[in-house]
């Protein structure tokens, strides 16, 4: 199935890192070089210091004598392909019960889902990512493998014979929509794109990549901001990845200096994300009134320094280094904003 068309099951965060957890590749490079859905290319990284006609593959159906190798029970975390159980699509579930981005999943539900992975070979199929000539990734089902070649079936029913090394490991369904990319057993381009898209389709535009926050520009209003959310993150009522969460952690742990680095291509959402972080900082450290003055500098600076470009209607034409000073009691006492010009357009 393609990244764009995969049905959306409800979110199933995982309990903990699976045994044999490993990381392959370079996230930043993968994200930057990714070629998935166009919207997924608009990602902003924030850091702070602080299936049809597919034959079921079962052990019984494989024939060693015929040169077809078998996939063993441990392959999910150790091999090229993974075993998975049939997933329930969102269409099969009660839409009302789909969790909001804000909700957390109880440990018991996570555990029962986790224990569902108990081997049941007859129910399992094999799948890997396969990149089509047009760059799209498809979740291919493995029918057979022999030597360096595999026979795969694509969601549109096509059956192809491909080189085994052209297949990219897919993660088990249990890892669908994890809120930290580091939890993926296989950290590769299609798996990262799939996770980000899975979450994005449920308005969860923020995903952690270890200490880094990945923000997908929604290009629309998403119900993730405002006083209720600020309050919830202040009270630690949710652990969903968010600029508020990373800001909250930074401000509580600092508490001397917080440095945010917003990186991403033009139009990725750096400026907006920085403003959201400032909104949280001012909500936490407000009281003197100066916080409103700091926030009001944004439209003034943008009026002088932003311009419409092909990529962004409100593109910053200068860089900003914003210092917000806090008193010992944790209240905002002042700010200093330095601007610098970009050397190239
Ligand atoms: N969190 C968000 N929610 C809704 N819309 C957003 C969000 N982030 C960005 N956008 C939309 O994307 C547009 C571009 O974002 P922004 O100006 O922050 O990009 P940028 O990375 O700073 O670009 P540049 O480098 O060109 O200045 C915004 O004007 C806004 O319409």
Image: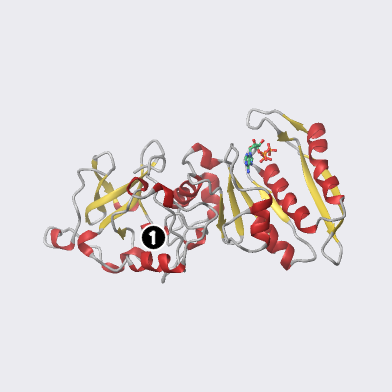
Quarter where residue 237 is shown? bottom right
Residue ID at (78%, 53%)? 282
The answer to whether 269 is drawn above or below residue 59 in the figure is above
Q: Which residue occupies the foreground of this view, 327 or 58?
A: 327
Residue 103: tell me if it is visible.
yes
**Residue 268 percent coordinates (x, y):** 62, 41
Q: Which residue occupies the foreground of this view, 22 or 44?
A: 44
In this view, the residue farthest toward the front is 96
**Residue 201 percent coordinates (x, y):** 48, 44
Residue that numbered label 1 is attached to: 174
Q: Is mark 1 within 8 Å of ligand 1?
A: no
In this view, the residue farthest toward the left is 65
**Residue 13 percent coordinates (x, y):** 46, 60
The answer to whether 150 is drawn above or below residue 134 in the figure is below
Residue 345: tell me if it is visible.
no
Q: Is residue 26 left or right of residue 147?
A: right
Q: Is residue 66 left or right of residue 294?
A: left
Quarter of the picture holding the C terminus = top right
Residue ID at (37%, 64%)? 113
Quarter of the picture holding the N terminus = top left
Crowding around mark 1 (Cα neighbors within 10 Å: few <14, some 14 to 19, many 20+) is many
The answer to whether 115 is drawn above or below residue 306 in the figure is below
């Amino acid at each position: 199935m393609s990244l764009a068309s995969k049905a959306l099951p409800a979110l199933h965060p995982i309990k903990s890192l699976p045994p044999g957890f490993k990381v392959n590749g370079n996230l930043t490079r993968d994200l930057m070089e990714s070629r998935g859905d166009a919207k997924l290319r608009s990602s902003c990284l924030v850091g702070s210091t602080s299936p049809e006609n597919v034959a079921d593959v079962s052990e019984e159906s494989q024939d060693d004598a015929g040169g077809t190798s078998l996939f063993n029970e441990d392959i999910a975390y150790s091999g090229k392909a993974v075993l998975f159980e049939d997933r329930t699509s969102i269409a099969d579930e009660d839409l009302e019960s789909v969790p909001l981005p804000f909700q957390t999943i109880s440990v018991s539900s996570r555990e029962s889902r986790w224990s569902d992975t108990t081997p049941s070979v007859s129910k399992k199929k094999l799948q890997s990512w396969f990149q089509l000539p047009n760059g799209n990734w498809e979740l291919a089902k493995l029918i057979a493998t022999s030597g360096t070649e595999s026979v795969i079936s694509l969601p549109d029913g096509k059956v192809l014979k491909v080189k085994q090394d052209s297949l990219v490991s897919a993660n088990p369904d249990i890892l669908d929509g994890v809120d930290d990319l580091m939890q993926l057993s296989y950290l590769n381009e299609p798996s990262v794109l799939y996770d980000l898209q899975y979450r994005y389709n449920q308005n969860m535009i923020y995903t952690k990549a270890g200490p880094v926050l990945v923000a997908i520009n929604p290009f629309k209003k998403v119900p993730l901001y405002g006083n209720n959310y600020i309050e919830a993150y202040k009270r630690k009522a949710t652990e969903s990845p968010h600029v508020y969460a990373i800001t909250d952690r930074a401000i509580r742990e600092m508490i001397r200096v917080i440095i945010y680095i917003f990186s991403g291509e033009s139009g990725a959402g750096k400026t907006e994300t920085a403003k959201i972080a400032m909104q949280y900082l001012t909500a936490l450290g407000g009281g003197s009134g100066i916080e409103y003055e700091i926030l009001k500098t944004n439209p003034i600076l943008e009026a002088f320094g932003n311009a419409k470009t092909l990529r962004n209607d409100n593109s910053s034409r200068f860089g900003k280094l914003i210092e917000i000073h806090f008193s010992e009691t944790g209240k905002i006492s002042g700010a200093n904003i330095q601007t610098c010009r970009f050397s190239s357009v």
